[in-house]
Amino acid sequence: MAIFEISILARVTWNLHSLNNEGTVGNVTEPRTVVLASGEKTDGISGEMFKHIHAYNVWLLQEDKSQFCEACQKLHPQRADMNNLTKRNHSPKEAMKTAISSCILCDLHGFLVQRPPVARTSTVEFGWTLGLPENTYRDIHIHARHSMVGRTREETAGEKSGEENQERQVTAQMIYHRPTRSGIYALVSAFQPWRIGLNEVDYNYVIDEPNRKNRYQLAINAYKATFMRTEGAMTSTRLPHIEAIEGVVVKSESNFPVPVISPLRNTFVEDIENLVKCHESLSYQKFANLKELCDNLTKLANQEIHKLLMPIS
C-alpha cells in the first residue's frame, strides 16, 4: 500500500533549553508563554520554529544544492518569489509548475509568489509544541559579559623620563538575564506525501515518481535529524538535553486524512488505537525512544507514496 499521509504524535523531554522566546525587554529575554483551553499558562515552542528546523535539515541533507531554487540555495525565506524562472511565467499554472519542478524546498515547504499571484501550502505541518503544565519548569539566570574596549599607555604625572609607562586596561561589563526551561512537551506534526510534486492549479504531477520518492525520503530523513538534534533559538549556549521521546507514528494508506490527537491528553495513544479500529486505511506504530521512532520512519521511507488518480481531459 502507498503512503497517503503521516502524523507524528509525541511527548518529548528536554532539559535546560531555550528554543523559543517572546523577545528581549531591556536586558531580560522573556520565554514564550501560551494559554491552553483550560486557562492554564504553559511554555510553548511555535510551529514556525520547528518548521524552520525541518526546512533547514532538508537543505542540509540534500547534497546537490542545485536542486534548490536560487533563493533556497541561500535559505532565503521568500523562496519561489525570488525565482527568476518563476517570474518569467505569466500564468499561475506555469509559475507553480516551475517553482515545484525546480526546487525541492519550495515543493516540500510551500511558497508564495506575488506576481502572478499563486500560493502553495506546505506538505509538512507542525503545531505548537506545548509543555505539560504539571511537568514544565522555568528559571531565569543572570549572566555578565565582559569585553575589552580599549587599551592606553599613559605616563603618570611627575614620572621621570626613564621610567616605564604604566598600562591601563579599560573594560566594559553588561549584565543580562536568560531563560532556561525543562519539561515534558507535547509535539504534533503531519506530513502529506501525496502532495509532493503536485501542481495545485491543474492537479497534475509535474515531476516523475523517482523524484517524488527521493523528496519524500529526504523529508523523512529531515524529521529524523530534527528529533536527533533539535537546533533552534539560543542553541549555541542552551543546546537541549534530549532525555526521552515516546508516542505514535500514524499512517494513512488511502485518501483519508491522518488523525492528529494532542499528546497533552494522557490517553492520546489509546485514542489513536480506537480511531484506527474504525478505518481500515489507518495504522500506527508506537515508539518508546528515539531509536524506535527512527526505525519506524525508516520503514515508512521505504514504502511507495500515494498518487492522485485524475481523469484524463
Image: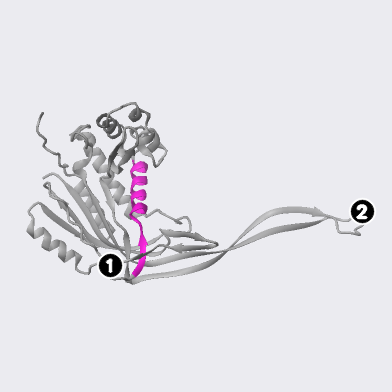
| Amino acid type at image mark 1 | Ala
Q: Are marks 2 and 1 in contact (CB under 8 Å)?
A: no
Query: For the residue labelled by badge 2, is the local secondary structure a helix, a strand or a loop?
Result: loop
In which quarter of the view is residue 41 placed?
bottom left
Label drawn at residue 37: 1
Which label sits in the foreground, 2 or 1? 1
Looking at the rendering, the stretch of residues picked out in magenta corresponds to: 41-61
Dot 2, how many residues are within 10 Å of its Cα: few (below 14), some (14-19), or many (20+)?
few
Above or below 266: residue 20: above
Does the magenta portion include 297?
no
Dot 1, how many residues are within 10 Å of its Cα: few (below 14), some (14-19), or many (20+)?
few
Nearest the eye: 193 or 289? 193
Q: Which residue is mark 2?
A: 161
Does the magenta portion include 50?
yes
Query: Across the whole image, how many numbered discs are drawn on residues?
Result: 2
In which quarter of the view is residue 308 placed?
top left
Above or below 189: residue 264: below
Query: For the residue labelled by badge 1, is the local secondary structure a helix, a strand or a loop?
Result: loop
| Amino acid type at image mark 2 | Ser
Q: Earlier in the sequence, mark 2 or mark 1?
A: 1
- In the picture, which quadrant includes the C terminus? top left
Above or below 168: residue 2: above
Q: Position of residue 54 (x, y in %)?
A: 33, 48
In the image, 284: left or right of 11? Answer: left
Image point (42%, 38%), residue name: 74
Q: Position of residue 104 (x, y in %)?
A: 30, 37
Q: Position of residue 146 (x, y in %)?
A: 62, 60
